[in-house]
Amino acid sequence: MSGSPARNRLSPMTTPVLQFVHRGELVSLRNVPATRTLLQLLREDLGIHAVKEGCNEGDCGACTVVLGERHADRIRYHAVNSCLRLAHAIAGMVLWTAADLQAQDGTLHPVQQALLAEHASQCGFCTPGVAMSLFGLYQNEVCQGRSVDRAQAQHALSGNLCRCTGYRPILDAAQHMSALPPVTVDETRLLGLLTKITPRQPDPAAVQDYAAPTRLDELLAERVARPQAQLVAGGTDVVLWINKLHRDVTEVIDLSRVDA
């Protein structure tokens, strides 16, 4: 879309198909509301309960998942709070949860082995989120042949709260990961799956309740056409309005894909 005139607000509202990769398969979901969070989608719609709901406002890290995004010919990994991420914001990405780390034959991932070896869990409620923060660190550092130092571990885990274990064994586990036999992700296969995702195309005959422009001119055109739509970037304010204040947000323009 480029510089199109404001569309009729009475045009039919549509919800774009949400496509992402999970567990080595392409997932396509229809009718996901614009304000549905990734946490709600995973736990309530897809039944993936390894993702925990704690504070539901981005403070505890229990809901952490890892997203993989294409970056040139590689995948870049980000640990994110799923309670603050709108579900449609993961379109075109790869998703991992704590339920996805263990191999099909039951072998533990080095992240899990390290947490076990260092006695880094007690009640376990925070552990899935901790494991996912460590998985992101593992993919970005250990899988690139680099060890993890204490400062990197502290930074990666800065969004994860633990009320009973204490942080020393968790930090020890972060540094222990690189000493274990490596486990790699088949990025070639994942990149191939990402190429099968259909790019979202604006529909001039309808208004989508969730728009994710990728260029500045597209964003400006969306804003002109829908000045009433809620702008969302990281979600740290807007998603709290939705989760905590139950504010009615019917249309969203996602800023996160526009580099400018």
Image (cartoon, helix red, strand yellow):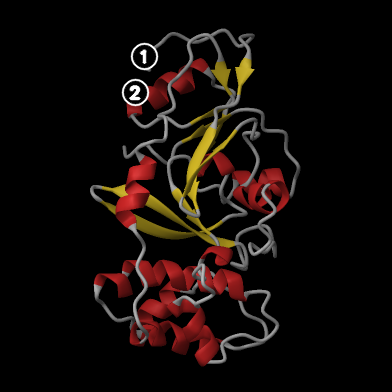
How far from the left and from the top, in percent, is residue 79? 47, 62
Label ID, residue 53: none
Label 2 SS: helix
Q: Which residue is mark 1?
A: 3
In the figure, 95 relative to 26: above or below?
A: below
Mark 1: few, some, or many residues within 10 Å (few <14, many ≥20)? Answer: few
Residue appearing at x 42%, y 19% in the figure: 221
Residue appearing at x 60%, y 21% in the figure: 14
Residue appearing at x 58%, y 44% in the figure: 86
- Whether residues under marks 2 and 1 lie with C-beta atoms below 8 angstroms apart, the answer is yes
Amino acid type indicated by mark 1: Gly
For the residues labelled 2 and 1, the Cα–Cα distance comes to 7 Å
How far from the left and from the top, in percent, is residue 129? 57, 69
Amino acid type indicated by mark 2: Asp
In the figure, 158 relative to 40: above or below?
A: below
Q: Quadrant of the C terminus?
A: top left
- Pick whichever of labels 2 and 1 is earlier in the sequence: 1
Q: Quadrant of the N terminus?
A: top left
How far from the left and from the top, in percent, is residue 219? 41, 26
Q: Which residue is mark 2?
A: 217
Mark 2: few, some, or many residues within 10 Å (few <14, many ≥20)? Answer: some
In the picture, measured across the screen, residue 146 lies left or right of residue 199, that is: left
